[in-house]
Amino acid sequence: MSNPDDLRYTAQHEWLRIEGDEVTIGITDYAAEQLGDVVFVELPEIGARVERGAVVAEVESTKSVGEVYAPAAGEVVARHDDVVDAPESINGDAFEAWLFRLRVDDPASLEGSGLLDRKQYLAQLGG
């Protein structure tokens, strides 16, 4: 399993690329593998306000539905419509198939919020 070192991870198998007050969010390759063949993706609308911990997106496969949670309160500033049009791209490369970008109200709120670095995330997976 290949997880880029510059990302942060959640216990719910989401990856985050933090760039100042913007966070790009996707699901990990482990999550994509566990879901199986992804057939549908629902993303938030640009401009939507979200609260930390709220379900913001859904990734549906032939086996189940995975929920994607907001890591912080903020506003959705971009969405990756290519994954809506071709949801299977998540199975191809989960790290390229980002889902949405969030401008967080308080970037400092991400620190100490339980985010994992690559080594910690892999340890959580038992590998």
Image (spheres, helix red, strand yellow):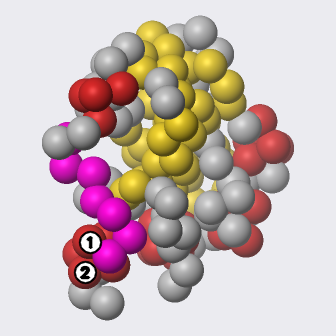
Q: CA distance from mark 1 to mark 2?
A: 5 Å
Position of 75 relative to 18 (above/below): above
Left or right, 97 with reference to 51: right
- Percent of width and height locating residue 34: 45, 74
User: Please, is residue 71 above or below residue 97 in the view?
Assistant: above
Q: Are marks 1 and 2 in contact (CB under 8 Å)?
A: yes
Residue at x 48% of width, y 57% of height: 7
Q: Residues within 10 Å of mark 2 (few under 14, many from 20)?
A: few
In magenta segment, residue 105 = no
Q: Can you tell which quarter of the image residue 67 is in?
A: top left
Look at mark 2 in the image and give the residue it sits on. Answer: 123
The numbered mark at residue 20 is: none
The three-letter amino acid code for the residue at tag 2 is Ala
Q: Which residue is mark 1?
A: 120
Q: Residue at x 19, y 49 (%)?
A: 114
For the image, the number of numbered tags is 2
Tell me the kind of residue under disc 1.
Gln
Question: Which residue is depicted at the point 68% across and 30% down?
Answer: 79
Occupied quadrant, residue 117 = bottom left
**Predominant secondary structure, magenta span:** loop
Q: Quadrant of residue 81?
A: top right
Front position in the image: 61 or 9? 9
Q: Position of residue 97 (x, y in %)?
A: 69, 54
Extreme-bottom residue of the structure: 127
Q: Is residue 32 left or right of residue 104?
A: right
- State the extent of the magenta-drawn residues as a range: 113-119
Q: Look at the image and tell me whether residue 58 can be seen.
A: no
- 115 within the magenta span: yes
